[in-house]
Each structure stands twice: as C-alpha cells, then as structure tokens.
C-alpha cells in the first residue's frame, strides 16, 4: 500500500508536490519546518539546530501535558536538523551532548507526565549519538564527553549515554571511564552524589560483563543487600556466563520471599536450563503453572516434560481448579482456552457470588466467551455483575454500557430454561429498579424492544 501511494505521488511530478507542500506549510508549523530543513544546506541545518537549542534555553513558554506530544515532535525535528546537517562524527557527538545538557531547560518548560519528552532523549537522541560515536575514531574523546555530561543528572535522563557506551566504545576505554567514576565516587562527600557515580559504574560493569565489579560496586553503594540487589547481581553473573555463581546469589534470597518472585523464577528457569537440571526445572515450571494457569505456563511446562502429557496435566489441574473455593478469573479463562467449557461453566456458576463487575476487562471477555458457547445462564450472571457495578458506582459515562448489558440480559432470559438457585430475570430486574430506580439518566435511555 505504501509503495503504491509513493508511486502515485511520484507520478504527480515535482511541481504538483512542491505546491502541495507549500500549501500544507501555510497551515502546519511542522510542515513549514520540514520544508526549511529539506531546502537548507548542511551548514544551514547546523545553524538551525544551534539556534533552536538556544531559543529553547531562553524560552519563557510552558507546555502542559496536552501539548507534550507536539513538543516531542518539535524536539525530534530539532535532532533531524542535526542529522541532516552534520556528517563529521565528532561534531555530531558534541552537538547531541549539547542537547542532553539542555535537559534542565526542556523538562522545566513542560509537563512530561506522558513520558513523550523523555522518550526523545532515551531513543531518538541516543540512537543519533551512537551513530556518530561508532563512526568517530577518537574513542577516548567520546568517553570524556559522556562522563562530562553525566557529572550531573537532575532528571535521570543523561545516564542514557552511559547505558549505551558498550555499543560504541571498546572495553579498554570503558574500564578507564570506570576508574574515573570510581575516583569521583571516592572524593564525593554527598551520599547521593556518590551513589550516582557508583550506579554509572554498575551500568558499565554490566555492559562489559564484569560481574565481580558489579557485585563489589553494589555492595559499596548500599551495604546490606536487598532482594532486588541479590537478583540484580545474580542476573549479571548469569549474563557473564557464570551460572553457578548466579545460582549461589539467588540462594541468598530468604525462603518464602515474594518480592520480585517473577524475576527470580525467570532467572532460575534459565539457570536450570543451562545446568541441565531437568528435575528442578520441572518443579519450578509446575510451580509457575499452578500459581497462574495459562496456555503460556502450560506450554513452558510441556516443552520440558513432553507434550504427550498434555491431557494428563490438564485433567489434573482441572480437578484442582474445581476444588478451590476462591474464584480466580484467570482459572476460568484457562479452562475455556483448553476446551473445558463444561468445567468452566460449573466453576463460574458455583462461585457466581464472587463475580466482581469492577473487573471489567476479564469478566467481559469471559461473558463473551461463554455466550459464544450458548451458556446463557452463566453468561447472564456475569452481565448482571457488570451491570450492578456500573449502577452502584453511579458512573454515568458507563451508562451506555450498562444499558447494553441490560438489553443483553433481556434477550438471554428467553433462552434460560433452568435458573437453578438464581433469581429469574424479572425478579433480578425488579431488584435493580428498587435499588437504582432514581437514576433517571440511566432508565430514560433504556428502552425494551417488544
């Protein structure tokens, strides 16, 4: 489609396209800026970059959250001026660094709660910096620039350049950077400032896969190690190829600790794979599967124990799910996903009192799945919960959804032959009218088709 449109535009000819661009530029500052960029010489684009950056530093305007996306595009165009204007890699590195050093001005003049502005630094500016730095022969100068920029980092964005050092600098240069940062940390009297330098060392140590240095630095920075720190150290040892030491660090985590359990188990899974310990790997995967039933956790387990055991595993777990007292919507989703529709219906009906309409996303998808299987009673129970949730909250913006649910309930009622222990539809409707009949904005829009 894109190639087709491009060819059609090419066929229009340069005059037509030039007129269209100029007409568009009358109504769009971005289009006007793009035209200026396209017709400028490389030298002029460098001057445009420098002037725009200078104008930002002297600007008194403030961009609220609604204008953040537009401001991020403005910054992207600023970097595009640089990319179009500078071919010399060292000059490019210096100018991208100047962009990072303008972070105080940029973040103080806008509300970046959306994260759009930060992303320009983390992705667009970083990619441009790496592109220039890779082509620059004087790697020591690149390292000096990265360190200079990172002496201060008030907005936690400049360390992006530290985090990508491994993409453009050799290990020898990175180790010299580490020595410099360690020297700064040793002389730093402010605790926060010291930790800032040590954190940068950690990033560089991880990039060159020096797990011992990472461990030493983390201990120096924090002293007593938290669960998160133990996991971080284990991860770096694993990345550096030292599987046994990685495992030994994970063993230091107290038994029963739930904090970052997902990250810990993910590392353990990789460790057991590398150690060839199928018994422990199987136990771990069974544990993960039973703590959260899904087709993904089932697949991971079967990949190890064999897909020929699929039916047995599903049957065993279905029995366990049906024995549980507490409703877990994920368990119902799993039963449906593996084709256990009868069991899913039984599971939901026996725990209907636990259905919570506030869990809109999961409950609605379950209702739709059961409706597709013509399980009208259990579908009605879920739509009732969704409707009651909306009415009890008095959330008027959701009333159109509530009206739709009530109309679905009206239609489903005709297909339910046995209401079991549940109220018939008319009795249910009478209850909600009694409880919420004064919500006229809801009932005025509800019309039952006869």
Image: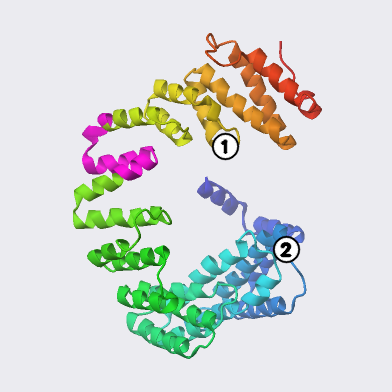
The numbered mark at residue 367 is none
The residue singled out by tag 1 in the image is 359
Q: What's the residue at 38%, 31% (across, down)? A: 321
Residue 203 placement (x, y as % from top left): 42, 73
**Colouring rule applied to residues:** rainbow
Left or right: 175, with 12 as reference point: left
Badge 1 marks a residue whose secondary structure is loop
Identify which residue is drawn at 44% across, 75% down: 222
Specify the quadrant that holds the C terminus. top right
Label 2, label 1: how far apart the Cα atoms are: 44 Å
Q: Which badge, 2 or 1, comes first in the chain's sequence?
A: 2
Look at the picture and state if 318 lies above or below 178: above
Image coords of residue 444 (percent x, y): 80, 24
Magenta stretch: includes residue 311: yes
Q: Which residues are magenta?
A: 286-312
The residue under the point 66% across, 13% down is 426
Q: Which residue is mark 2?
A: 29
* Residue 219 visible in rendering: yes
């Amino acid at each position: 489609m894109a190639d087709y449109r491009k060819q059609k535009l090419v066929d229009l000819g340069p005059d037509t396209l030039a007129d269209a661009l100029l007409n568009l530029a009358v109504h769009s500052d971005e289009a006007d800026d793009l035209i200026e960029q396209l017709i400028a010489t490389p030298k002029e684009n460098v001057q445009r970059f420098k002037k725009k950056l200078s104008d930002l530093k002297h600007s008194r305007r403030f961009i609220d959250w609604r204008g953040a996306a537009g401001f991020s595009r403005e910054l992207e165009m600023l970097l595009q001026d640089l990319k179009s204007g500078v071919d010399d890699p060292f000059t490019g590195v210096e100018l991208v660094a100047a962009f990072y050093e303008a972070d105080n001005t940029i973040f103080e003049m806008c509300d970046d709660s959306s994260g759009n502005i930060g992303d320009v630094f983390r992705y667009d500016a970083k990619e441009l910096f790496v592109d220039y730095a890779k082509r620059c022969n004087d790697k020591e100068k690149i390292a000096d620039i990265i360190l200079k920029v990172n002496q201060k980092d008030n907005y936690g964005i400049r360390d992006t350049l530290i985090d990508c050092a491994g993409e453009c600098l050799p290990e020898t240069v990175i180790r010299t950077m580490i020595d410099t940062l360690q020297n700064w940390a040793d002389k730093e009297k402010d605790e926060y400032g010291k930790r800032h330098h040590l954190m940068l060392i950690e990033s560089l140590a991880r990039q060159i896969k020096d797990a011992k240095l990472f461990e030493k630095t983390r201990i120096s920075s924090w002293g007593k190690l938290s669960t998160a720190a133990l996991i971080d150290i284990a991860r770096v040892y694993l990345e550096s190829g030292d599987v046994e030491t990685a495992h030994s660090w994970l063993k230091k985590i107290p038994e029963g600790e739930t904090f970052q359990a997902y990250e810990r188990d993910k590392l353990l899974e990789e460790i057991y794979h590398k150690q060839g310990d199928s018994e422990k790997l199987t136990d771990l995967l069974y544990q993960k599967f039973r703590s959260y039933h899904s087709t993904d956790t089932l697949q991971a387990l079967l990949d190890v124990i064999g897909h020929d055991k699929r039916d047995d595993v599903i049957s065993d777990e279905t029995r366990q799910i049906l024995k549980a007292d507490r409703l877990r919507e994920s368990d119902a989703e799993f039963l449906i996903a593996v084709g256990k529709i009868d069991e899913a219906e039984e599971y939901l009906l026996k725990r209907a009192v636990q259905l919570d309409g506030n869990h809109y996303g999961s409950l609605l998808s379950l209702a739709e799945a059961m409706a597709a299987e013509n399980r009208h009673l259990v579908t009605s129970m879920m739509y009732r919960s969704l409707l009651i949730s909306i009415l009890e909250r008095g959330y008027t913006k959701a009333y159109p959804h509530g009206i739709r649910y009530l109309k679905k309930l009206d239609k489903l009622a005709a297909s339910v032959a046995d209401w079991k222990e549940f109220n018939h539809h008319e009795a249910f409707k009478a209850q909600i009218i009694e409880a919420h009949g004064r919500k006229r904005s809801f009932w005025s829009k509800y019309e039952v088709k006869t």
